[in-house]
Amino acid sequence: MPYELPHPWPTTPREAVTLQESLRDQVIERDEVGEARLVAGVDVGFEDGGQTMRAAAVLLSFPSLVLVASAAARRPTSFPYVPGLLAFRELPALLDALGSLGDRPDLILCDGHGRIHPRRFGLACHLGVATGIPTIGVGKSHYLGQYEPPGPQQGDWNPITDRDEVIGAQVTPQHVPIRNRGPSSLADRRPMKGNSAAASVSPNAPV
């Protein structure tokens, strides 16, 4: 299922900021996900000294976590690295990879932030709005806001706030080793060291 960019693509940081400000109100923060049977994970890397984007997407059944499909896509890098404007660098390749999976996911997890963003419209928000699929951003590092460290148990979490607004959650995650037929038991899901900041974004994603 191909996904198209829903608007003219900015070529300058100023145009990108203007577009973020015009689209951020399209994010739906209430929980309308429903039953998620297919979950996609996406990420982007770079080749040729950053001149080429390489996006990867995997589709897993849920809750069994059996691999359903995987895809990769490459594009020339056409937008510079600018903090807060990651979507304009990575989104085109991500849409290509998602569109090559075949089946439409019920939920997407992406490496990037959502509402944890100066304009409340990070990569995960933009991906959710562009595809119409509930999307959760999972950031590897702290970007914005304040929080108290959550407890050590898998699933422990505390809100991330900025200027008295809740913009995400700091979560103690789990490591799920994916096998050919998925994890053999819940015992395979071992807690990871450290925490991961996760912002719920959409449309139609839980806060």
Image: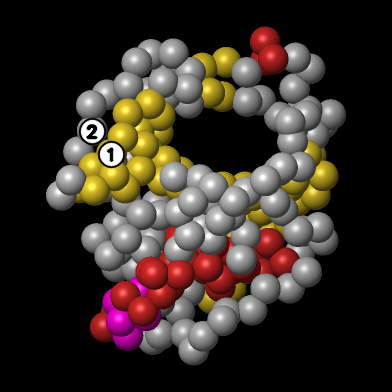
Indicate whether 57 appears above or below 95: above
Describe residue 138's horizontal placement relative to residue 76 as left or right: left
Colouring style: secondary structure
The residue range painted magenta reads 15-20
User: Dot 2: within a 10 Å radius of its alpha carbon, few (fewer than 14), some, or many (20 or more) residues?
Assistant: some
Q: CA distance from mark 1 to mark 2?
A: 5 Å
Q: Quadrant location of the C terminus?
A: top left
Q: Position of residue 142 (x, y in %)?
A: 28, 41
Residue at the image point whose x is 53% and y is 61% from the top = 203
The residue indicated by pointer 1 is 160
Q: Quadrant location of the N terminus?
A: bottom right
Q: Looking at the picture, which amino acid does disc 1 mark?
A: Ile
Between 184 and 154, the residue placed more toward the observer is 154
The residue indicated by pointer 2 is 147
Q: Quadrant of residue 37?
A: top right
Residue at far top of view: 187
Verify whether residue 17 appears in magenta. yes
Residue at the image point whose x is 35% and y is 43% from the top = 168
Q: Looking at the picture, which amino acid does disc 2 mark?
A: Tyr
Disc 1 vs disc 2: Cβ atoms closer than 8 Å? Answer: yes
Indicate whether 92 appears above or below 174: below
Q: What's the magenta bit mostly, secondary-structure-wise?
A: helix
Residue at the image point whose x is 27% and y is 24% from the top = 149
